[in-house]
Amino acid sequence: MRALMVGRFQPLHNGHLSVLRQLAEASDALIIGIGSAQYSHTEKNPFTAGERHLMISKTLEAEGIDNYFIVPITDVNVYPLWVAHVESLVPPFDEVFTNNPLTELLFKQKGYKVENMPLYDRNRYSGKSVRESMLSSSDPKDWEELVPPQVVEVIKEVQGVERMHTIMENDEYHE
Amino acid sequence: MRALMVGRFQPLHNGHLSVLRQLAEASDALIIGIGSAQYSHTEKNPFTAGERHLMISKTLEAEGIDNYFIVPITDVNVYPLWVAHVESLVPPFDEVFTNNPLTELLFKQKGYKVENMPLYDRNRYSGKSVRESMLSSSDPKDWEELVPPQVVEVIKEVQGVERMHTIMENDEYHE
Amino acid sequence: MRALMVGRFQPLHNGHLSVLRQLAEASDALIIGIGSAQYSHTEKNPFTAGERHLMISKTLEAEGIDNYFIVPITDVNVYPLWVAHVESLVPPFDEVFTNNPLTELLFKQKGYKVENMPLYDRNRYSGKSVRESMLSSSDPKDWEELVPPQVVEVIKEVQGVERMHTIMENDEYHE
Amino acid sequence: MRALMVGRFQPLHNGHLSVLRQLAEASDALIIGIGSAQYSHTEKNPFTAGERHLMISKTLEAEGIDNYFIVPITDVNVYPLWVAHVESLVPPFDEVFTNNPLTELLFKQKGYKVENMPLYDRNRYSGKSVRESMLSSSDPKDWEELVPPQVVEVIKEVQGVERMHTIMENDEYHE
Amino acid sequence: MRALMVGRFQPLHNGHLSVLRQLAEASDALIIGIGSAQYSHTEKNPFTAGERHLMISKTLEAEGIDNYFIVPITDVNVYPLWVAHVESLVPPFDEVFTNNPLTELLFKQKGYKVENMPLYDRNRYSGKSVRESMLSSSDPKDWEELVPPQVVEVIKEVQGVERMHTIMENDEYHE
Amino acid sequence: MRALMVGRFQPLHNGHLSVLRQLAEASDALIIGIGSAQYSHTEKNPFTAGERHLMISKTLEAEGIDNYFIVPITDVNVYPLWVAHVESLVPPFDEVFTNNPLTELLFKQKGYKVENMPLYDRNRYSGKSVRESMLSSSDPKDWEELVPPQVVEVIKEVQGVERMHTIMENDEYHE
């Protein structure tokens, strides 16, 4: 059985990791979709799909997990096409893990088995809280302890914190 | 004379119907454009173009009106192309009915005759008020009396109220 | 039961009409998709989606057929998205009529019932043969007898034969 | 040395002109990119790329400046592609002038020399302040004195103030 | 009176130059559209829009012609939108020069005055003949005498002949 | 050092495998780009990106190779954007392996080190020869011996040979 799970991973955090560990354990192979793959260098999506790919693969390698596929998935912005778009990009799968009611509805309409994702502390671990901490904390440990150490490495390699500060100053074109 | 009228019909309501009746009466043939055709499953655009097509045609059939064309029109998001885009999709027409000043400007610039649409109670009948009532009312009659009975049927056939509640819980990707 | 049939109708000819008559008879409602809807003014696609809409509706009106929906369908050029794209544009349907093996495969994979279309003389009646006759015959009757009289009217209204000759002289930009 | 500077010029104002004068003086040739070129007829982007082209060229002609290229640049909405997109549209260049930190980052990553733009009174001269004055002032002099006289001419030629009032009444489709 | 003329200019040759001289003379201002602007690095479109812009402006500067606008125009691949697309990108114009019957038809349908372009020896001067000569001649003079000397300079600056040989060896992906 | 290699893998064959083995050996990590990722169900591109992902990962797993990333890369059809597009999708890399002169030129222009790919018998092993053999051979062994056994498995799982025969009968829309 191959299972699918899609996230934006901006960036991958310890909550994600806890989910990935359990899903990889529970399935023959786990397909990890990187959503909104075409976006980067924005407040909500600072990292490229390639950088997120690296965060996930380095972390899972350190965890000793190897039964997974990572697939960048661009947004199509038209919901009724979304399931077919995902199907065209990833290996065939039988089951979908999600906590999002609309994702659940769309995959169920196409006949997929849909399951809830395992729980973790979503107040503490979320992409938004990590990004806010990267921008506002004087102590890097504040955000570094929310993510796996391999993610810290990747963010340092690409000068991610500096990039986020630059993005926040962006006001598009000079008016 | 063929006349054009474009709306989003999310969903078709009694105000629309009153307009359609009068315009169909006043023209040899009425072209009914379904705007923002590519969108669905969102708060502002819950229904697909096909579902809206069905709402309109079932209602007009019950009304005994048959001198019309229904044409889904996708958004192009670039105003100067909009009139040419509409022209490429619908049968040739002579006259446009709209209450929107920008639509009026764009069609007049291309040489079309533009007329105001007939009046109705816009506070009571609007797509927004119907959608809000579908989400918040405990009594389905509250929204059902704002739309033709054929629209109620279509919305029930596609489980539209349940879909709208699902859409409202959507927070895109799991962060 | 609603049935779907998709064609390019460049232009609608007597073979199409024979098929439409039989399918409209055999189903509660027939959804007629106008394929490659965004194209026009080319050798293979001379007429706009709106002009083709007009050809079909005028012809069916003259035939006394009224249990149909006409829906322009733009090409997406990515086969795995095609069925979902069609589903998002047309009213819900149960059955698909096609003689194309790939269309059959794609709809069957999504669980639709697929049937072959009724037969007619495809050597005599085809969009290609009508278009070639419009360009090469000295006697307009040669192509006019291949299409319903309402199609002749529409083609004359939009000066379609002249347009086709103009298209054939097109060599894109001046080199 | 060819230098690049990109702005939206909605519309060109005296602050822009002061910058253009200094950059044209400082470089062999100045490439002036018109950003967000595909948009017009919106509150933030009222004028078409062609109208903005005309504002700039008429003004620079009156100034006796002639060592420049004007190039409309459509938005691609994907930051990592932006520099390559600009490179494909404009003549080769060596240096970029910008005050935007993200633009600076993106061009520096591709090896370009990036300089700050000359200063002017940004509270007084900005596209936003000109557009607001066009909409709210009873005396046209209020906005006319913020822009070069050639820009006043172009805006009158295309009935720009009337267009902006029309745009503000736009509520998209009739609900 | 502003006049419009659109070409691909792959590359600008002496036939184009003869036309530009006469049209610039005959109009208050000549808008020169660079068609198929998004393409480059292919057999039919070896040069980028920016490189073609440079060829034209350097040549016209040497000719002492300065009453022109150069505007890159991307293809939209949907004919009925083409005139509106051009209108949105270039300054307002009154007259169109073309020898292409379809371009003539499309602009006339929108109410423009359309004139034929001045004649020159099209067998000798064409983009195709220049490109073929660049690829096949052992003596660079064979192609250099077909284009203005400023075009030779630009092609040398960007190593255009080497690029064309590289393009011809391209077989897309390694199969 | 991370190295990049892009192919269409329609399907993965023994020549590809020989290359992948050598490149994985020669680099710290090999990024394998699946080109033309959005296409499938056509003569030249029968398999989806997900199916090709599965072919590669199953084969490399059987080979005991694990220092690689697989990334689907959609075509952008505009060469000057191609390198930036790849960069946005894949993890950072230092070196590119290709035998295609245009790919070499484009990556070298952006400062990458480019190397030729290792040799193998390209007459015997090519996507085209495998696809032709799948369609024409009466004995499945003819194509099965050109590809790794894991690819045979995947093609059987998705009924690939049947799909290819269906594709060949496709004549688009019924004319």
Image (tube, coloured by chain):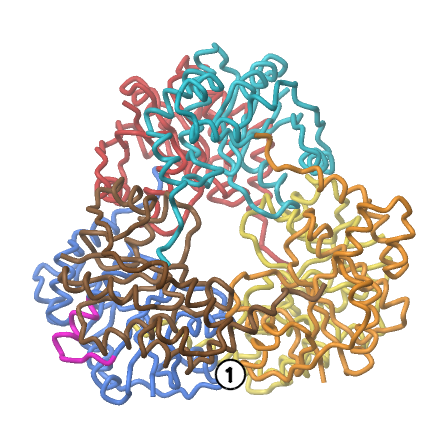
Chain colours: A orange, B brown, C blue, D cyan, E red, F yellow
Q: Position of residue F104 (x, y in %)?
A: 68, 46
Chain to which mark 1 belongs: C
Q: Which residues are magenta?
A: C55-67
Q: Position of residue F113 (x, y in %)?
A: 77, 45
- Inspect the image, locate mark 1, and give the three-letter code of the amino acid beneath it: Gln
For the residue carrying disc 1, how many other residues have a C-alpha within 10 Å: few (<14), some (14-19), or many (20+)? few
Question: Dot 1 corresponds to which residue?
Answer: C109
Is D171 in front, or is E38?
D171
Q: Position of residue C98 (x, y in %)?
A: 35, 81
Q: In the image, F44: left or right of B61?
A: right
> Which residue appears at 65% of the width and 67% of the height?
F9
Query: Circle 1 sits in a helix, a strand or a loop, which is it?
Result: helix
Which image quadrant is residue F59 in?
bottom right
Is C15 in front, or is D104?
D104
Is residue A82 rendered magenta in the image?
Answer: no
Q: In the image, E80: left or right of B93?
A: right
**Residue F74 in sight in this render:** yes
Q: Main secondary structure of the magenta part?
A: helix
> Which residue appears at 41% of the width and 28% of the height?
E13
Up-down relation of residue A135 to residue C124 (above or below): above
Instruction: Please give the count of numbered marks on the rendered protein.
Output: 1
Outermost residue to the top: D64
> Which residue appears at 21% of the width and 54% of the height?
C164
Which image quadrant is residue D54 in?
top left
